[in-house]
């Protein structure tokens, strides 16, 4: 006998179904693609609404409505499964823009066959489908889709001439086909131009973003972005059992390098030290130029002992580097202060403790690593 309550296994299944997210929570790119898919789905709904209104006006046949009720859900559920399972990633265009547009054109072709007097209004659906590709397709792709659209409409006209010639004014159909060809040709050129401008703008914005977060001289993160990343690490530490450490690095006697060898050589020292720091950090770690000849290293998921080893590795690597100058070859050394983030402390306190450890390293003779005590 059972008490009528579902088993734990069934409860787990029901819970998973209820909690299943419509959009992936940890994949922003895939989430954007699915949002675009829902935009395409809204076009299907608009197309169905237009068809149903035409049916109510007695200018479209019920067979079109019945077909839409089957075809539209099947197509869109299939696309959603492809996106949620990640199968779209195997395609050259993971957004499946062209494939979704071809599917929409074929569905419209089906409705156009039964549209009767409303066929002229249904032509607007083709334009809406092309709008879907404005930000993704170039002119050549637009033209290929336009040709496919004209081909499907031409097939509709041929089928109507063969099976239902008494219900069609073919003079109007040919005129509509010709006008549609002109509209699609113009739209393809304009849409391709907009897509090209968007891609150029995207590249420009990417370059601007890179410039906004990197130090122009060394290529390391600038101070502003470094503070943003540190703030993110502190929030991660606050939310869970997460630790990280920071190290403030200063080039010893850097002013004498500029005075002796010139500012160009000094700039080269800064660039080289920045690169050597990054070469000796893990991929999860990061560093930035904090100011002047100071660099701040952030070692994620690292306690104080691990951070000390990392800082010493950086110090030793820089000490061995030989710089070539016209006057004479020379080496530079660095001093580092290391500290581990303490729960709930603010950014100012964290940096201050790293600074104190750095100054202690300098007082003890430079070219060494000291930790906060």
Image (cartoon, rainbow, N blue to C red):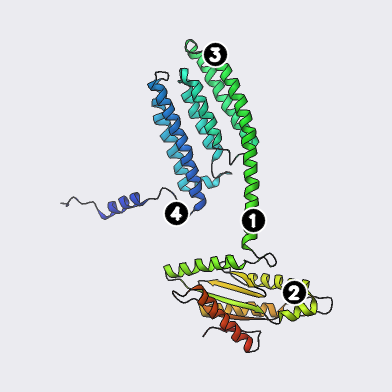
Residue 324's quadrant in the figure?
Answer: bottom right
Decide which of tag 4 and tag 3 comes sooner along the chain.
4
Q: Which residue is mark 2?
A: 266
* Residue 49, position as x, y percentages in the image: 41, 29
Is residue 357 left or right of 266 when viewed as pictured? left
Q: Secondary structure at mark 1?
A: helix
Residue 95 higher or lower than 221, as above or below: above
Decide which of tag 1 and tag 3 comes sooner along the chain.
3
Viewer-side label of 2, 3: 2
Q: What is the CA distance from the residue labelled 1 to the residue labelled 3?
A: 55 Å
Is residue 277 left or right of 239 when viewed as pictured? right
Q: Which residue is mark 4?
A: 25
Is residue 160 left or right of 189 when viewed as pictured? left
Q: What is the CA distance from the residue labelled 4 to the residue labelled 3?
A: 52 Å
Q: Secondary structure at mark 3?
A: helix
The reply to whether dot 2 and dot 3 touch (C-beta < 8 Å) is: no
Q: Is residue 308 visible?
A: no
Q: Which residue is mark 3?
A: 170
Q: Which residue is mark 1?
A: 208
* Residue 345, position as x, y percentages in the image: 46, 75
Q: What is the CA distance from the residue labelled 1 to the residue labelled 2?
A: 26 Å
Q: Residue at x 58, y 84 (%)?
A: 370
């Amino acid at each position: 006998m059972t008490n009528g309550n579902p088993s734990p296994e069934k409860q787990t299944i029901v819970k998973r179904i209820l909690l299943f997210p419509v959009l992936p929570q940890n994949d922003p790119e895939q989430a954007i693609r699915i949002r675009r898919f829902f935009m395409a789905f809204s076009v299907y709904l608009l197309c169905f609404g237009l068809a149903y209104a035409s049916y109510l006006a007695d200018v479209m046949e019920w067979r079109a409505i019945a077909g839409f009720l089957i075809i539209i859900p099947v197509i869109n559920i299939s696309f959603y499964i492809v996106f949620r399972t990640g199968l779209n990633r195997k395609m050259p265009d993971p957004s499946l823009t062209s494939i979704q547009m071809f599917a929409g054109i074929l569905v419209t072709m089906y409705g156009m066959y039964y549209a009767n007097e409303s066929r002229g209004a249904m032509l607007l659906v083709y334009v809406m489908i092309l709008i879907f590709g404005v930000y993704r397709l170039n002119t050549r792709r637009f033209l290929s889709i336009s040709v496919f659209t004209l081909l499907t409409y031409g097939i509709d006209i041929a089928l109507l001439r063969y099976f239902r010639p008494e219900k069609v004014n073919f003079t109007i159909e040919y005129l509509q086909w010709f006008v549609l060809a002109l509209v699609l040709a113009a739209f393809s050129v304009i849409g391709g131009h907009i897509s090209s401008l968007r891609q150029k703008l995207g590249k420009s914005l990417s370059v601007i973003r890179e410039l906004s977060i990197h130090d122009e001289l060394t290529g390391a993160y600038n101070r502003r972005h470094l503070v943003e990343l540190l703030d993110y690490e502190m929030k991660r530490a606050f939310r869970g059992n997460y630790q990280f450490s920071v190290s403030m690095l200063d080039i010893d006697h850097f002013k004498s390098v500029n005075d002796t060898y010139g500012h160009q050589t000094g700039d080269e020292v800064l660039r080289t030290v920045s690169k050597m720091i990054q070469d000796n950090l893990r991929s999860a770690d990061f560093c930035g130029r904090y100011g002047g000849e100071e660099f701040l290293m952030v070692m994620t998921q690292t306690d104080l002992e691990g951070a000390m080893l990392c800082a010493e590795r950086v110090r030793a690597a820089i000490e061995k580097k030989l710089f070539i100058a016209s006057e004479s070859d020379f080496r530079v050394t660095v001093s580092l202060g290391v500290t581990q983030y303490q729960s709930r402390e603010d950014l100012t306190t964290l940096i201050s403790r790293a600074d104190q450890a750095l100054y202690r390293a300098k007082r003890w003779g430079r070219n060494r690593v000291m930790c906060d005590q």
